[in-house]
Image (spheres, rainbow, N blue to C red):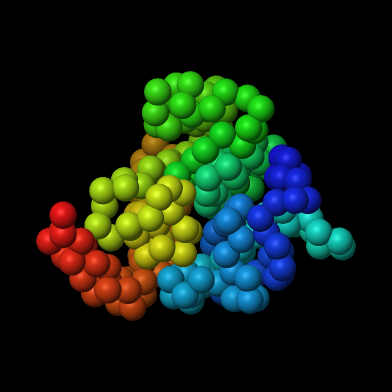
Amino acid sequence: MVREFGEDGIRGTGPPVVWRGPEPAPVVLVLDPAGEAKHNELPATWRPLAQHLRVGWCRLPAEVGDEPSVEEILGGLSGRVHLVASGTAAEPALRLALEFPVVRTVVAVDPAPADSGTAHADDYGTTADWWDRATEESRSALRARGVRVGAFLSRESDPAVRVEPPVPLGHPDVVGRVVQTLLSFQGDRAHPEPVEPERGEVVEAWHAVQQQFGPALQRARKSGGSGT
């Protein structure tokens, strides 16, 4: 599980878990191996989401000292949980979803192999091939349970991103794609559970992000598009 991240992980100083947002709201639990949210606060791009959603930001490894592990956090939640995992946290997120029925969605951002001792993404040709083939069994098992799994890979050519993958979870383009992925799972008639009450809250959260960061993101795309 997330205990697979060793004590020499990148989390460094700062709180292992940051919670923001109204407690009755749908929970989005972020698994971050890159160590953002260092100052007991969410990245600025996520704060508008916390006006409408309950966001828990786990800087991995989370289980430091007396702090709870991600497993313990999930074990204490009763409502539906949407997991967002970046890079090497993507595979553990799938395993967490298989273990904890409260997880209803997994969104992987620039997923990468969690175990450097196993086959690398390069062995499959592309990262997308690795994700499709190496995680197919887990994703199929989750789909059979009605758990939605989505993944997206950033493009180095995207003028709004301008950084190598994995793109930081605080990047506004990542926030937008995470919310859009969650919305794509909402209102699906094939889904065995009612999800419409959550859709309105996710839409409101996305509008808050667009209002605050949309113009800057558009400027980044335009300026990047005019370069070499």
- Residue 221, quarter of picture: bottom left
- Residue 206, quarter of picture: bottom left
One can see residue 20 in this view: no
Horizontal and vertical percent position of residue 205 = 40, 69
Image quadrant in which the C terminus is located? bottom left
View extreme (right): residue: 66
Horizontal and vertical percent position of residue 87 = 53, 45
Name the foreground residue: 35 vs 197: 35
Image quadrant in which the N terminus is located? top right
Residue drawn where x is 48% and y is 29% of the image = 121
Residue drawn where x is 37% and y is 65% of the image = 172
**Horizontal side of residue 210 vs 80, given as left or right:** left
Name the foreground residue: 191 vs 149: 149
Residue drawn where x is 39% and y is 28% of the image = 126
Q: In this view, does 16 lie above or below 7?
A: below
**Horizontal side of residue 201 vs 162, given as left or right:** right
One can see residue 101 in this view: yes
Residue drawn where x is 47% and y is 69% of the image = 46
Horizontal and vertical percent position of residue 170 = 46, 64
